[in-house]
Amino acid sequence: MTSEEYLFDNDWKLARERLAALERDRDYATIRCLEAIGVAARWHCLEIGGGGGSIAAWLCERVGSMGSVLATDTNTRFLAALDYPWLEVRTHDVITDPLPAAEFDLAHTRLVLTHLPERERVLEKMAKAVKPGGWLLVEEPDFNYREYCSRDRRGFDTSMDPRHASGRPRSTAAWDGRHSWPAAL
């Protein structure tokens, strides 16, 4: 996907502010999911669509110098500012560029697949990049979820499930490679 085709390109003059707003809104839930999965020292992690780098930085802190993080994006200008020797930043088009096979304990993406017409193919590539027993964490809007839950007048989930008490629509799925997937977190 070229920058001409993508509305939220990182070359936009306000891209850092846009990404910071997304990080403020989404990082807490993402980190809770990563903690629930058990990301730990020595893990090898893949971050697709690393954007502003907040989750790549969190992963680097968590896996430490004995682990590794590969953070990719079509525009890596903000990721390049991160300073961790065990972080590899790669300019990468997840649609056309290959991913290593069975190399990662975790592959994560957030708010990327919804922009791609080839999302199923990309999801399959990401799943193949995960080691047996590893995790694939995908955070994307679920535009069909409203049919299956109670909603208030704004469209937010009002169910009593404590895992979704934030008042936001469910949008996260994780797969551990051992069970049918996806499992909602």
Image (cartoon, rainbow, N blue to C red):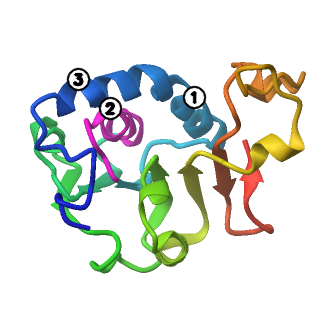
Q: Position of residue 168 (x, y in %)?
A: 67, 26
Question: Mark 2 — residue?
Answer: 54
Magenta span contains residue 129: no
Q: Earlier in the sequence, mark 1 or mark 3?
A: 3
Question: Mark 1 — residue?
Answer: 29
> Residue visible at 66% across and 48% down?
142
Q: Nearer the viewer, residue 58 or 95?
A: 95
Check disc 1 and give the amino acid type: Ala
Q: Is residue 144 left or right of residue 75?
A: right
Q: Position of residue 26 (x, y in %)?
A: 49, 28
Q: Nearer the viewer, residue 111 or 67?
A: 111
The quadrant of the rendering that contains the C terminus is top right
Q: Earlier in the sequence, mark 2 or mark 3?
A: 3
- The numbered mark at residue 17 is 3
> Residue visible at 78% across and 27% down?
157
Q: Main secondary structure of the magenta part?
A: helix
Q: Residues within 10 Å of mark 2 (few under 14, many from 20)?
A: some
Q: Nearer the viewer, residue 160 or 62?
A: 160
Q: What kind of element bears circle 2?
A: helix
> Residue visible at 87% across and 37% down?
149
Magenta span contains residue 57: yes
- Determine contact: label 1, label 3, CB under 8 Å: no
